[in-house]
């Protein structure tokens, strides 16, 4: 059988749809650390949801004049994440996660542009 394998999930070439959720889960890479033992900042789904919600509001307010957000928007996300989830989230975490999401979105767009998808 001819299957395209993305991280061990076979997809028939005739498949016309790919879910953003599944594509993101295939792209995620973890180190397998037990919860609470890593010194790295870990983004949970609720954190990511708040992150996207706030940045959407900031873009609608005009705080994204080009392809990057203003520093005040990044700070707002970091403060909201820290306050709501009782973690230490800094602007560098927000900037890095923004870069990660952008790279993942580019990969998803590339996959969708391949023959046999979308």
Image (cartoon, rainbow, N blue to C red):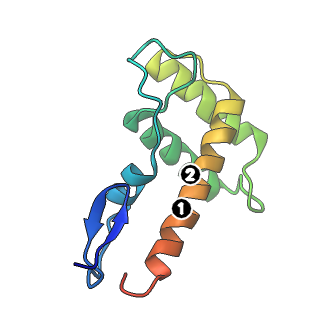
Q: Residue drawn 32% across and 65% down?
A: 19
Please tell me which residue lies in front, 83 or 2: 2
* 46 in relation to 99, above or below: above
Q: Secondary structure at mark 2?
A: helix
x and y percent of residue 1 in the render? Answer: 22, 78
Q: Quadrant of the C terminus?
A: bottom left
Badge 1: few (under 14), some or many (20 or more) residues near its Cα, within 10 Å? Answer: some
Q: CA distance from mark 2 to mark 1?
A: 6 Å
Residue bearing mark 2: 101
x and y percent of residue 6 in the render? Answer: 38, 61
Labelled pair 2, 1 in contact (Cβ < 8 Å): yes
Q: Residue drawn 38% across and 35% down?
A: 46
* 38 in relation to 15, above or below: above
Residue bearing mark 1: 105
Q: Residue drawn 77% across and 62% down?
A: 66
Please tell me which residue lies in front, 81 or 20: 20
x and y percent of residue 65 in the render? Answer: 77, 60
């Amino acid at each position: 059988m001819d299957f395209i394998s993305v991280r061990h999930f076979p997809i028939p070439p005739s498949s016309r749809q790919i879910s953003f959720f599944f594509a993101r889960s295939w792209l995620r890479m973890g180190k397998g650390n037990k919860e609470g033992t890593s010194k790295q900042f870990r983004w949970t789904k609720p954190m990511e949801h708040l992150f996207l919600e706030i940045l959407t509001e900031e873009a609608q307010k005009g705080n994204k004049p080009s392809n990057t957000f203003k520093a005040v928007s990044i700070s707002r996300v970091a403060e909201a994440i820290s306050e709501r989830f009782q973690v230490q989230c800094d602007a560098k975490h927000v900037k890095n996660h923004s870069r990660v999401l952008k790279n993942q979105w580019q990969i998803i767009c590339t996959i969708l542009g391949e023959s046999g998808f979308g």
